Image: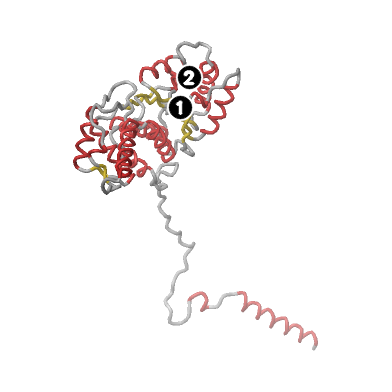
Amino acid sequence: MRREIEVADSSKRKKAEGSQGAPGLEEVFGKRGEPFITPPSKPPEKPREPVLPPPTPANPPGGGKGLDDVLVELDGMIGLEGVKAQVRKTINMVGLGREREKAGLRPFVFTHHLVFTGNPGTGKTTVARILGRIYKEIGLLKKGHMVETDRNGLVEGYVGQSALKTKQVIDEAMDGVLFIDEAYSLVPADIARDFGVTEVIPTLIKAMEDYRDRLVVIVAGYTDKMDHFIKANPGTESQFKNKIEFKDYDPAALFKIFLHMGSEAGIRPSLDAQTAIAKLMESLETGKKGFGNGRTVRNIFDECLGRQAARLAARTKKVDLTIFEKDDIPKVGEMVFF
């Protein structure tokens, strides 16, 4: 009797397990009234998303977004049309080199160091500073700042000191522009063993070769003297291949510079004063070596201020501090301006 009960229980357990393990009709064919759907043999593949090329950056490496602003500042400078064209040519050459590199073409050697030639007061220092900012915006230089120096900032009186001093200035200018004004003074014609020749120039050339991607050197000075500077050393000839000539301002540009100085000072010339200023600018010896250009205009402007101050001190009549009168302008031939 006991064995019969155990057999019956075993039979019930097997039936229960069978009902749990095997799918019922509803599981296979669906519930009554539902359409029969053949189950898919494998899950459908998701449609592949199209692979798009990486977006072209809107701005070149180095920030780029400020390049237009810097170029507007350059274009806003009075005159210097040839200089502006040369600066844009330099920018275009940098762009060409990068495109060739992307295309896998053989890179060409292009030095970014520059020679600025011309008389003083033609904007060389200002353009050098703007170039540093441009080079930063196009990714050529990391900082783009400018360090300005001359012979006094590079040459010392004892052996070895000039090389050390030059290295310190180079370190300060690293990732930016080193601007050397009156660079020809580093190579005096009458002193063969000058420290500028034996220490400064070799140190400078080595840095230009070792850090060509981190340092731009711009040398400036009178045209004839800079020719001597370049030819004095084979290294300078190979490094300084690009020259930008800063021509003297013509009388019309000098007149505009005067008006600009007045605008910054909150002073405008009367109509009679403007006529006198134009005649004075026409009389200046532009093109002569040593002509001061913007510096000359500054000297004239300061003289006008002095005459306005004298009128104010005289107290003979009311003086409008915002206006230059005809009497404030020096007459042609009255004074010599350089």
Q: Which of 56 and 127 lies nearest the eye of the viewer?
A: 127
| Amino acid type for the residue under numbered disc 1 | Ile
Quadrant for residue 11, please give it: bottom right
**Label 2 sits on what residue type?**
Leu
Q: Nearer the viewer, residue 62 or 75?
A: 75
Identified at 25% across, 29% down, the residue is 250
Which element is circle 1 on? strand
Q: Are marks 1 and 2 in contact (CB under 8 Å)?
A: yes
Q: Secondary structure at mark 2?
A: helix
- Most extreme residue toward the bottom is 1
Place of residue 244 in the rendered image (x, y in percent of width and height, measured from the top left): 35, 26
Residue 197 position (above or below residue 216): above
Query: Would you place residue 230 above or below residue 35 in this image?
Result: above
Residue at screen point 46% across, 82% down: 32
Q: Quadrant of the N terminus?
A: bottom right
Residue at numbered disc 1: 180
**Of 53 and 23, the residue lying toward us:** 53
> Nearer the N terminus, badge 1 or badge 2?
1
Q: Which mark is residue 304?
A: none
Provide residue 278's location: percent of width, then percent of height: 21, 34
How many marks the image carries: the answer is: 2
Residue linked to disc 2:
186
Relative to residue 175, is residue 122 drawn left or right?
Answer: left
